[in-house]
Image (cartoon, rainbow, N blue to C red):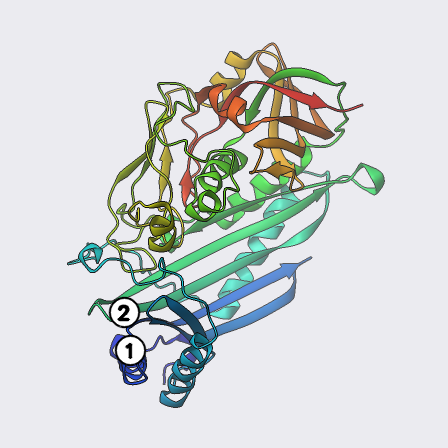
Amino acid sequence: MPDPRNELPAPGTLEAFVQQALDDARQRGADAAEAACSGDIGLSVNVRKGEIDTLEHHRGRDMGVTVYFGGRKASASAGELSEQAVRDAVQAACDIARYTSEDPANGLAPAERMAVDPPELDLDHPWPLPADEAVELARDCESAAVEADRRIENTEGAGVSVHRGLHAYGNSHGFFSVLPESRHSIHCVAVAGRGEAMQRDYWYTVARDPAALEDARDVGRRAAEHAVARLGAESLHTERVPVLFRAPVARGLVGHLVSAVRGSALYRQASFLVDSAGEQLFPAWLQMVERPHIPRALGSTAFDAEGVATAESALVRDGVLQRYVLDSYSARRLGLETTANAGGVHNLEVSGGEEDFDALLRRMGRGLVVTELMGQGVNLVTGDYSRGAAGFWVENGVIDRPVQEITIAGHLRDLFAGIRAVGSDVDRRGNIRCGSILVEEMTVAGQ
């Protein structure tokens, strides 16, 4: 008999609950409604020093419903999928709506923007991994880290995660769709040295298709290499130098742009990029394009969280900001149209040159490579940027020594305009896909 923990609800079951929510909302007088429900299953295993630290089977069923009475809006959720739970959630949302204020920007996304015949994106790849095999895979990952270098004195463990989900969305325009998806990962955290000289670092691999994951032992070895490379790290004297953001942290720099041009920040006047559409923010060679229909990519989707069809769309073309990142509500507040970004961006690709990481080092000559950022010192209202950092000092185009306990600072406008290169070492492990980013100059503060 199949293990029920390994089974997702039938698509027809989710459709029935969504339709019930929409029908109940209409019967209670709502002008419009939308509902989303999902079923998720998964397995996560973590080991440390070869022993099982945690082993969890995950099984989730939930639903959310939003109702509209004119310009009044309210939402409620259910922690299970049953007719009574759905009925109670709709009733709660309708009751709450009586006390909410009118807002003319509230409402469903436009009916004509709903996704029709969405493309097949190949997002669901089951990984029938038994728990005992997941434990052995995590152990292999951790042991590879320990065996990689005698200076690996300890680990913070290694883990394997398996996840599948079935997500349904429908609204009173008559739109309904169910999307199956999967997401699997392997990770390891290695600790090098001992006492006050210890350094830790990590590596991970994530993909929808388990066949696309890096080998577990390679993940462990890379975690070990990164940790060992940081041994002997020291601070720096304060000066202004070029800074190279390694690919895994470079996407955070792009993420600050996305946050600053998100509709909610713009209509609240809480962004340094208010009224910036059409402005030259980056060098003329730089492009940023959303490509939501890449098969098996982590950020791929046929429609956003409101059912709006997604399509390839430039965010930055020839260095010029082309548009904002909007859902239907923020679009109405700004007098614009939704950009199909309810829920975020989808495979935002930053154009990369042909230079690999070593070539970027040579181009920089002397400066700082950032591999880790700490703190929340980014003010999107003013654009001021100041973060704790760690990484490597570069002399004559090669890495000279590890550094830590430093701060990098500047203004985001200057950082964007001062980008000198984007590397070919693209990190695709997220919704923002870009290579390492070389910035002309920042203040690096240390001793």
Query: Do we see residue 401 in this rendering?
Result: no
In the image, 113 versus 39, the foreground residue is 113
The answer to which quarter of the image holds residue 193 is top right
Q: Quadrant of the C terminus?
A: top right
Dot in front, 2 or 1: 1
- Checking the image for residue 252, the label placed there is none
Q: Please give the name of the residue rendered at 19% of the width and 70% of the height, measured from the top-left corner.
A: 174
Q: Earlier in the sequence, mark 2 or mark 1?
A: 1
Q: Position of residue 157 (x, y in %)?
A: 65, 55
Q: Where is residue 135 in the image (x, y as percent from the top left)?
A: 55, 64
Residue type for callout 2: Gly
Residue type for callout 1: Leu
Residue most extreme to the left? 117
Residue most extreme to the bottom? 84
Crowd rating for badge 1 (residues with CA inside 10 Å; few <14, some 14–19, many 20+): many
Q: Are marks 2 and 1 in contact (CB under 8 Å)?
A: yes
Residue 144, above or below 170: above
Mark 1 secondary-structure assignment: helix
Q: Please give the name of the residue rendered at 42% of the width and 41% of the height, measured from the top-left corner.
A: 432
In the image, 206 versus 170, the foreground residue is 170
Residue at numbered disc 1:
22
Q: In which quarter of the image is the N terminus?
A: bottom left
In the image, 30 versus 260, the foreground residue is 30
Q: Position of residue 187 (x, y in %)?
A: 55, 51
Residue at numbered disc 2:
170
